[in-house]
Image: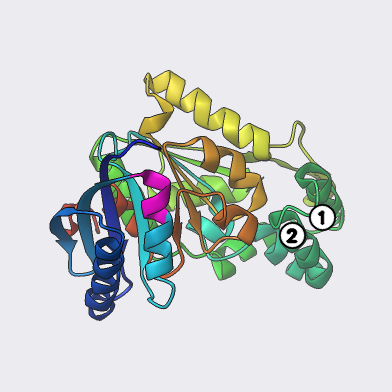
Amino acid sequence: MRPCMELVLTLVSPASGALPAAEAAVDQALARADLSVKAHEPLGPCAVDIYLEGELGAVRKLALEALAHHATDAAVQPIAHRRKGLLLADMDSTIINVECLDELADFAGVKAQVAEITERAMRGELEFEGALRERVGMLKGLSLSALQAAYDERVRLNPGARTLVRTMAAHGARCVLVSGGFTFFTSRVAEAAGFHANRANTLIDAGGALTGQVGEPILGREAKLAALKGEAQALGLDLSRTLAIGDGANDLAMIEAAGLGVAYRAKPIVAAQADAKVDHADLAALLYFQGYRAEQFVTD
């Protein structure tokens, strides 16, 4: 028999009106499973903590089944160490709304071809490094001015991103943007959202245009995992005190290794392995998952 432990089940809805029905559905499921709920503690109008004892995997499965028809996200975790000291976040389609490489490809007139490769790589069907080299090769000759245009015209922070990063930073956590994309974009996104540092790949240029090459070694799945471990070690943090979020297959290693690994609007291969999913609420859900209350959010 697997051991029972002190758990907290956090429910987060995109709107306050959706929360009561979801909360009731979870309560009914817990009661049918003979699990004793110790307390409900509201975190804000759209979020609540439910404290209980149980087996982690079983409670997580039960909660997800109960919420199958509700627009509500959930995280189940041990009470200990739920407040994290390190955030590692993917950039494209996680912290921002687009895949930057696909948008550059649009300026180069090859978006359909590049986007298809991107989708397959993010689903884990293609080896990331080779797929990146192939896509960057298709950008050969693209003017550097297209990079700034793509950033200005296409890149937007996803809802809740700035609040997530600034709130965690204000409470002493280190926040790092780690991307299989490019430093041109991560440096700007990191500044806009409030990250302490950023890591990504480098596009090589000459004569004011891209050469179609990317700097080596390529930052991919294993490099993201190494970044998580290295940052945690530098801070003297156990991995249980870390949080990682992403959407694609190259994020999977860091998501699996983190104390709380979260899949954001993710590909199935990632959603299936993550500790929690955010499919409905915005990125501020990760603050609720850590026990932050709405009044503690930094929103300026």
Pick the front one: 258 or 53 = 53
Q: Which residue is mark 1?
A: 135
Q: Choose between 26 and 275: the one closer to the eye.
A: 26
Q: Are marks 2 and 1 in contact (CB under 8 Å)?
A: yes
Q: Which element is circle 2 on?
A: helix
**Which label sits in the foreground, 2 or 1?**
2
What kind of element bears circle 1? helix
Please say if 107 is above or below 287: below
Residue 223: x and y in percent read 64, 33
Instruction: From the viewer's perspective, tell me whether residue 122 is left or right of residue 91.
Output: right
First in sequence: mark 2 vs mark 1: 2
- Which residue is tagged 2? 118
In percent of the image, x 49 and y 65: which residue is there? Answer: 156
Viewer can see residue 51:
yes
* Other-residue count near label 2 (Cα within 10 Å), few / some / many at <14 / 14–19 / ≥20: many
Q: Quadrant of residue 83?
A: top left
Q: Amino acid at mark 1?
A: Arg
Residue ranking furthest to the bottom: 17
Q: Which residues are drawn in magenta?
A: 55-60
The quadrant of the rendering that contains the N terminus is: top left
Examine the rendered structure and indicate whether residue 95 appears above or below residue 282: above
Q: Residue at x 36, y 32 (%)?
A: 241
Q: Amino acid at mark 2?
A: Thr
- Residue occupying image coordinates x 36% and y 60%: 74
Q: Nearer the viewer, residue 187 or 35?
A: 35
In the depicted structure, whether residue 137 falls above or below residue 218: below
